[in-house]
Each structure stands twice: as structure tokens, then as C-alpha cells.
């Protein structure tokens, strides 16, 4: 656990850098988190993914699998990997302010 | 000392049963999800995982599978003779596929597409292709290339090789 002050707000993170309280999240904070994770700009397509991840997390307590994410958010697998290069589910979860995704798919 | 992260995996899928094919697919997809380079090399009966006509007919073996239990994973061991009854393998497969679907594990065809779209590479073993008299049109479009074992080692350079 650690805290960081971002945009004049005390934000708490777990050891892997995921926010521990998703209610502290805002789109402005997402932009800052994105920069910290190597993404210069967040587009509408990024936010489509982020919003879907947050919605699923709030409803179920866990982020969606990549399969569900691509099927239900309308962002195909290829685009998802392009939007969040490297590890898409993890990176999107970091920026969406939710916990690290659990599950193998 | 912190170990160096794995950057690349090459996974050999050599068996054509459901439990022969899925672990390799899950590992390859998981590798891409973690940002690793992933190669899948299908050989021998594992090749059925990327054959258009057969990939969604992959089944679990109910004979010669002493760990198999019914009606669920903590039930009674399934006697080999019962496992041999017609329809047993199809039934066990459909039960398992239902459980997998709950976990969002896709059918083989969709899974291969997903791995390919995620940037994973799909290869077929040349020796098996020749032995089974297969050609390009027998394969799903995601199959990138038919490789010799030498090619496979070459493209696996610098990564881990996993045999399943």
C-alpha cells in the first residue's frame, strides 16, 4: 500500500500500482494515470474500454475477461492491444482505477 | 535477486484431446495478455486444433484417463468400460465446455482467432502436415505458416519452449 498526491488528491495504491479505492477515480485522474503508464493521450476508444471495465468492476467486484470486454464493449481484440500496448487488461485496469484483473482468460 | 521477466514463449501443442489442446491455448493467450511474445506450434494430433473442419470437434478422453471422475471433479472415478460407452466422450466434453464457458474460455476456433488477433503466432508442423496429407485449405486462416522443426527452433530463439 502507498499513497500519492495526484491532482491535489490523496490516492491510495496497492503494491502493484492498482488503485485500492475506485471511488477516488475521475476521467482527469485517468489521464494522469495513463501518462504514468506510458500512454500520452486517452481517446474516446480508450474511455469506451475504461468505462466498460469500471462498470463491470462495480457490478461484479472484478474486471471483465478480455473475451467479455471485446464482445460487449465493441472494441475488437486487435484494437484493444493497440489501445493499451503491452498488457491490455492490466494496463486498462490500472488506468480505470480498479483492482488487478483476476482470472486466466 | 529479482529474476528476469519472461519475454517470449513458444508452446508446442502435441495432443489432440480437449485437455491436450486447451492448456497450450490458455498459456499462449495469457502470455499475450502479459505482453510477452507468443508462438504456438501444433504438431501430431495437436494439429487438429487448427484444422478448420475438426477444431470444434475436440473432445475429452473418457478412456485411458484415470483421473476422470463423475458426475463432477470430486465424484467417483469413471470405470474404463463405462467411459467406452458410445456418447460418453461427447457428454463429458459438453459438461466441461459448459463449465469453461462460465469462465469465459472460448471454443477452440474462437480461441485461436483471439490469440491470433492478440498478436500470437500460429504454426503447423511440417512433418505432421506431410504425414497427414494436409494442405493450406485444411487449416484455419489464422495459421501463419508451416514450419520445419529447424524453423521452429530458430524463431524460438531467446525465449522459453514449453511442450504440452
Image (spheres, grey):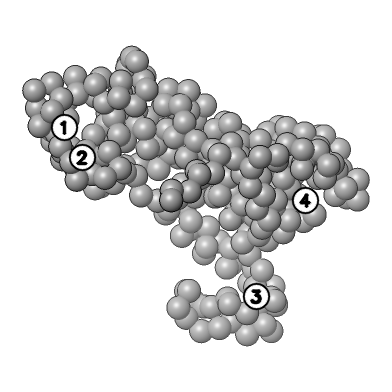
Task: Nearest to the eye among marks 2 and 1: give it.
Answer: 1
Secondary structure beneath dot 3 equals loop
Q: Is residue B117 above or below residue A7?
A: below
Q: Residue furthest front?
A: B1
Return the x and y of residue B154 as percentages of the image width and height: 77, 38
Q: In terms of sequence position, does the residue under pointer 2 or pointer 1 come before the other? A: 1
Secondary structure beneath dot 4 equals loop
Query: Pointers 2 and 1 in contact (CB under 8 A)?
Result: yes
- Mark 4, chain letter? B
In whole angstroms, how far apart are the C-alphas of marks 4 and 2? 45 Å
Residue at 69% x, 84% y is: B81
Residue B51 marker = none
Return the x and y of residue B149 as percentages of the image width and height: 82, 45
What residue sits right under mark 2 in the picture? A13
What residue sits right under mark 3 in the picture? B65
In whole angstroms, how far apart are the C-alphas of marks 4 and 1? 51 Å
Query: Pointers 4 and 1 in contact (CB under 8 A)?
Result: no
Query: Pointers 4 and 3 in contact (CB under 8 A)?
Result: no
- Viewer-side residue, B2 vs A10: B2
What residue sits right under mark 1 in the picture? A4
Secondary structure beneath dot 2 equals strand
- Mark 2 packing: few (<14 Cα in 10 Å), some, or many (20+)? some
Residue at 67% x, 49% y is: B161
Same chain, labels 2 and 3: no
In whole angstroms, how far apart are the C-alphas of marks 4 and 3? 21 Å
Amino acid at each position: 500500500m502507498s499513497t500519492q498526491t495526484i491532482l491535489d488528491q490523496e490516492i491510495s495504491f496497492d503494491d502493484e500500482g492498482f488503485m485500492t479505492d475506485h471511488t477516488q477515480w475521475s476521467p482527469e485522474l485517468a489521464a494522469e494515470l495513463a501518462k504514468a503508464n506510458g500512454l500520452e493521450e486517452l481517446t474516446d476508444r480508450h474511455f469506451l474500454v475504461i468505462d466498460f471495465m469500471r462498470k463491470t468492476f462495480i457490478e461484479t467486484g472484478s474486471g471483465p475477461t478480455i473475451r467479455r470486454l471485446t464482445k460487449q464493449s465493441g472494441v475488437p481484440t486487435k484494437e484493444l492491444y493497440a489501445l493499451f500496448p503491452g498488457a491490455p487488461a492490466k494496463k486498462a485496469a490500472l488506468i480505470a482505477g480498479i483492482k488487478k484483473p483476476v482470472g486466466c482468460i | 535477486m529479482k529474476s528476469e521477466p519472461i519475454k517470449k514463449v513458444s508452446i508446442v501443442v502435441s495432443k489432440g484431446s480437449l485437455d491436450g489442446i486447451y492448456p497450450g491455448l490458455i498459456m499462449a493467450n495469457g502470455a499475450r495478455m502479459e505482453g510477452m511474445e507468443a508462438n504456438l506450434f501444433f504438431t501430431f494430433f495437436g494439429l487438429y486444433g487448427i484444422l478448420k473442419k475438426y477444431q470444434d470437434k475436440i473432445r475429452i478422453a473418457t478412456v485411458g484417463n484415470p483421473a476422470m471422475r463423475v458426475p463432477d471433479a470430486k465424484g467417483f472415478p469413471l470405470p474404463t468400460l463405462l467411459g467406452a460407452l458410445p456418447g460418453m466422450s461427447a457428454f463429458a466434453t459438453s459438461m466441461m465446455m459448459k463449465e469453461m464457458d462460465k469462465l469465459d474460455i472460448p471454443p477452440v476456433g474462437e480461441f485461436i482467432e483471439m490469440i491470433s488477433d492478440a498478436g500470437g503466432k500460429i504454426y503447423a508442423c511440417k512433418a505432421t502436415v506431410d504425414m497427414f496429407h494436409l494442405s493450406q485449405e485444411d487449416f484455419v486462416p489464422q495459421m501463419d505458416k508451416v514450419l520445419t522443426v529447424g524453423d521452429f527452433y530458430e524463431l524460438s530463439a531467446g525465449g522459453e519452449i514449453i511442450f504440452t
